[in-house]
Amino acid sequence: MLNTMNITEPSTRRSLLGDPRLRSELVAMVRRRVPPGEVEDVVQATLTEALLATSAPEPLEELRRWVWGIARHKVADVHRKKRHVSDDDIPEPAAPGDGAREATDLLRWAERELPESEGARETLGWLLREGDGEKLEHIAEAERLPAPRVRQRVTRLRQHFRTRWQAQLAAVATLVGAVALFWWWLRPRAPEAP
Protein backbone atom coordinates (compact mmCIF):
# COMPACT_ATOMS: atom_id res chain seq x y z
CA MET A 1 0.00 0.00 0.00
CA LEU A 2 1.38 3.40 -0.97
CA ASN A 3 1.76 5.90 1.87
CA THR A 4 0.47 9.30 0.75
CA MET A 5 1.49 11.14 3.92
CA ASN A 6 4.64 13.20 3.90
CA ILE A 7 7.16 12.85 6.67
CA THR A 8 6.88 15.89 8.91
CA GLU A 9 9.92 17.63 10.27
CA PRO A 10 10.52 16.20 13.76
CA SER A 11 10.97 19.67 15.24
CA THR A 12 7.61 20.87 13.84
CA ARG A 13 5.84 17.80 15.13
CA ARG A 14 7.54 18.06 18.54
CA SER A 15 6.64 21.72 18.88
CA LEU A 16 2.98 20.99 18.14
CA LEU A 17 2.84 17.94 20.41
CA GLY A 18 4.60 19.86 23.18
CA ASP A 19 2.17 22.76 22.93
CA PRO A 20 0.26 23.05 26.25
CA ARG A 21 -2.82 24.35 24.42
CA LEU A 22 -3.05 21.19 22.31
CA ARG A 23 -2.69 19.06 25.42
CA SER A 24 -5.39 20.97 27.32
CA GLU A 25 -7.73 20.76 24.31
CA LEU A 26 -7.11 17.01 24.08
CA VAL A 27 -7.74 16.59 27.82
CA ALA A 28 -11.01 18.53 27.55
CA MET A 29 -12.17 16.46 24.57
CA VAL A 30 -11.19 13.12 26.11
CA ARG A 31 -12.64 14.04 29.53
CA ARG A 32 -16.09 14.34 27.95
CA ARG A 33 -15.85 10.87 26.45
CA VAL A 34 -14.09 8.54 28.92
CA PRO A 35 -14.13 7.96 32.70
CA PRO A 36 -11.90 10.31 34.74
CA GLY A 37 -9.36 7.59 35.50
CA GLU A 38 -8.73 6.96 31.81
CA VAL A 39 -8.29 10.57 30.61
CA GLU A 40 -4.57 10.93 31.29
CA ASP A 41 -3.81 7.49 29.84
CA VAL A 42 -5.65 8.26 26.59
CA VAL A 43 -3.98 11.66 26.18
CA GLN A 44 -0.52 10.22 26.87
CA ALA A 45 -1.10 7.33 24.45
CA THR A 46 -2.29 9.77 21.78
CA LEU A 47 0.72 12.06 22.09
CA THR A 48 3.15 9.14 22.28
CA GLU A 49 1.73 7.49 19.17
CA ALA A 50 1.81 10.79 17.28
CA LEU A 51 5.39 11.43 18.33
CA LEU A 52 6.63 7.94 17.44
CA ALA A 53 4.80 7.68 14.11
CA THR A 54 7.11 7.28 11.14
CA SER A 55 4.96 9.48 8.92
CA ALA A 56 2.56 12.32 9.56
CA PRO A 57 0.86 15.03 7.51
CA GLU A 58 3.05 18.04 6.80
CA PRO A 59 0.90 21.18 7.08
CA LEU A 60 0.39 22.16 10.70
CA GLU A 61 -3.42 22.18 10.48
CA GLU A 62 -3.50 18.68 8.96
CA LEU A 63 -1.10 17.51 11.63
CA ARG A 64 -3.45 18.85 14.31
CA ARG A 65 -6.44 17.04 12.73
CA TRP A 66 -4.36 13.87 12.50
CA VAL A 67 -3.59 14.04 16.25
CA TRP A 68 -7.31 14.55 16.99
CA GLY A 69 -8.06 11.48 14.88
CA ILE A 70 -5.60 9.43 16.91
CA ALA A 71 -7.32 10.64 20.08
CA ARG A 72 -10.75 9.62 18.74
CA HIS A 73 -9.43 6.15 17.97
CA LYS A 74 -7.92 5.86 21.47
CA VAL A 75 -11.28 6.84 22.99
CA ALA A 76 -12.97 4.18 20.87
CA ASP A 77 -10.40 1.64 22.08
CA VAL A 78 -11.26 2.45 25.71
CA HIS A 79 -14.97 1.89 25.07
CA ARG A 80 -14.26 -1.27 23.09
CA LYS A 81 -12.22 -2.72 25.98
CA LYS A 82 -15.05 -2.02 28.41
CA ARG A 83 -17.47 -3.87 26.13
CA HIS A 84 -15.31 -6.98 26.04
CA VAL A 85 -15.08 -7.64 29.78
CA SER A 86 -14.88 -11.32 30.60
CA ASP A 87 -17.13 -12.95 33.19
CA ASP A 88 -14.11 -13.46 35.46
CA ASP A 89 -13.54 -9.70 35.62
CA ILE A 90 -17.04 -8.94 36.87
CA PRO A 91 -17.08 -8.80 40.68
CA GLU A 92 -19.68 -10.72 42.63
CA PRO A 93 -22.53 -8.50 43.77
CA ALA A 94 -22.50 -7.61 47.44
CA ALA A 95 -25.08 -9.18 49.70
CA PRO A 96 -28.23 -7.08 49.49
CA GLY A 97 -28.63 -4.61 52.29
CA ASP A 98 -25.06 -4.70 53.62
CA GLY A 99 -23.48 -1.51 52.33
CA ALA A 100 -26.65 -0.09 50.83
CA ARG A 101 -28.41 0.10 54.18
CA GLU A 102 -25.42 1.76 55.85
CA ALA A 103 -25.11 4.23 52.99
CA THR A 104 -28.82 5.03 53.17
CA ASP A 105 -28.65 5.54 56.93
CA LEU A 106 -25.62 7.78 56.58
CA LEU A 107 -27.33 9.81 53.86
CA ARG A 108 -30.45 10.23 56.02
CA TRP A 109 -28.25 11.39 58.91
CA ALA A 110 -26.50 13.90 56.62
CA GLU A 111 -29.84 15.27 55.37
CA ARG A 112 -31.09 15.66 58.96
CA GLU A 113 -27.91 17.43 60.02
CA LEU A 114 -27.77 19.84 57.07
CA PRO A 115 -27.36 23.45 58.12
CA GLU A 116 -30.26 25.81 57.52
CA SER A 117 -28.21 27.87 55.06
CA GLU A 118 -29.32 28.38 51.49
CA GLY A 119 -27.76 25.91 49.07
CA ALA A 120 -26.85 23.32 51.73
CA ARG A 121 -28.65 20.53 49.87
CA GLU A 122 -26.87 21.49 46.65
CA THR A 123 -23.53 21.43 48.49
CA LEU A 124 -24.38 17.98 49.86
CA GLY A 125 -24.91 16.86 46.26
CA TRP A 126 -21.46 18.16 45.36
CA LEU A 127 -19.97 16.36 48.36
CA LEU A 128 -21.57 13.11 47.24
CA ARG A 129 -20.38 13.60 43.65
CA GLU A 130 -16.87 14.18 44.96
CA GLY A 131 -17.19 10.98 46.98
CA ASP A 132 -18.02 9.16 43.74
CA GLY A 133 -14.69 10.31 42.32
CA GLU A 134 -15.58 13.48 40.46
CA LYS A 135 -13.15 16.35 41.02
CA LEU A 136 -14.44 19.57 42.56
CA GLU A 137 -12.99 21.53 39.64
CA HIS A 138 -15.15 19.56 37.22
CA ILE A 139 -18.20 20.04 39.45
CA ALA A 140 -17.55 23.80 39.51
CA GLU A 141 -17.16 23.80 35.75
CA ALA A 142 -20.46 21.94 35.31
CA GLU A 143 -22.26 24.28 37.74
CA ARG A 144 -20.63 27.34 36.14
CA LEU A 145 -19.24 28.53 39.48
CA PRO A 146 -15.72 29.47 40.51
CA ALA A 147 -13.81 26.41 41.74
CA PRO A 148 -12.67 28.10 45.00
CA ARG A 149 -16.29 28.81 45.95
CA VAL A 150 -17.34 25.18 45.39
CA ARG A 151 -14.28 23.93 47.27
CA GLN A 152 -14.98 26.32 50.17
CA ARG A 153 -18.64 25.33 50.44
CA VAL A 154 -17.81 21.61 50.43
CA THR A 155 -15.08 22.16 53.03
CA ARG A 156 -17.48 24.09 55.28
CA LEU A 157 -20.11 21.37 54.97
CA ARG A 158 -17.53 18.71 55.84
CA GLN A 159 -16.50 20.74 58.89
CA HIS A 160 -20.15 21.13 59.90
CA PHE A 161 -20.72 17.37 59.66
CA ARG A 162 -17.51 16.69 61.58
CA THR A 163 -18.61 19.06 64.38
CA ARG A 164 -22.09 17.51 64.54
CA TRP A 165 -20.65 14.00 64.59
CA GLN A 166 -18.23 14.92 67.40
CA ALA A 167 -21.08 16.47 69.41
CA GLN A 168 -23.19 13.34 69.00
CA LEU A 169 -20.27 11.10 69.99
CA ALA A 170 -19.68 13.26 73.06
CA ALA A 171 -23.36 12.91 73.99
CA VAL A 172 -23.19 9.12 73.63
CA ALA A 173 -19.98 8.99 75.70
CA THR A 174 -21.60 11.12 78.42
CA LEU A 175 -24.65 8.85 78.44
CA VAL A 176 -22.48 5.72 78.71
CA GLY A 177 -20.50 7.34 81.53
CA ALA A 178 -23.70 8.28 83.39
CA VAL A 179 -25.07 4.73 83.04
CA ALA A 180 -21.78 3.28 84.31
CA LEU A 181 -21.75 5.69 87.26
CA PHE A 182 -25.40 4.90 88.06
CA TRP A 183 -24.68 1.16 87.87
CA TRP A 184 -21.68 1.58 90.16
CA TRP A 185 -23.79 3.56 92.66
CA LEU A 186 -26.60 0.94 92.64
CA ARG A 187 -24.47 -2.18 92.82
CA PRO A 188 -24.73 -4.10 96.06
CA ARG A 189 -22.00 -3.22 98.48
CA ALA A 190 -20.36 -5.71 100.78
CA PRO A 191 -21.07 -5.00 104.45
CA GLU A 192 -18.19 -3.41 106.25
CA ALA A 193 -16.36 -5.67 108.70
CA PRO A 194 -16.44 -4.54 112.42
Image (spheres, rainbow, N blue to C red):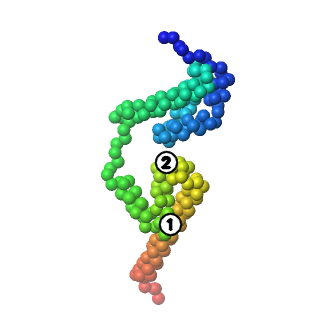
First in sequence, mark 1 or 2: give its number: 1
Q: Is residue 79 above or below residue 12?
A: below
**Residue depicted at x 46% and y 62%:** 121
Within 10 Å of disc 2 (Cα), the crowding (few <14, some 14-19, many 20+) is few
Judging from the image, what secondary structure is the residue with disc 2 in? loop
Q: Is residue 128 visible?
A: yes
Q: Distance from label 1 to label 2 (Cα)?
A: 25 Å
Q: Residues within 10 Å of mark 1 (few under 14, many from 20)?
A: few
Indicate whether 46 appears above or below 119. above
Residue 76 placed where, x, y %?
44, 31
x, y percentage for residue 42? 52, 33
Residues tagged 1 and 2 counted as in contact (Cβ below 8 A): no
- What's the residue at 64%, 31% (across, down)? 18
- Residue indicated by mark 1: 118
Judge from the rendering whether residue 34 lies leftward or rightward of residue 87; answer left or right: right
Going by the numbered disc 2, the residue's amino acid type is Gly
Q: Secondary structure at mark 1?
A: loop
Viewer-nearest residue: 100 or 126? 126
Residue tagged 2: 133
Between 169 and 48, which is closer to the camera in this rendering?
48
Residue 52 vs residue 172: left or right? Answer: right
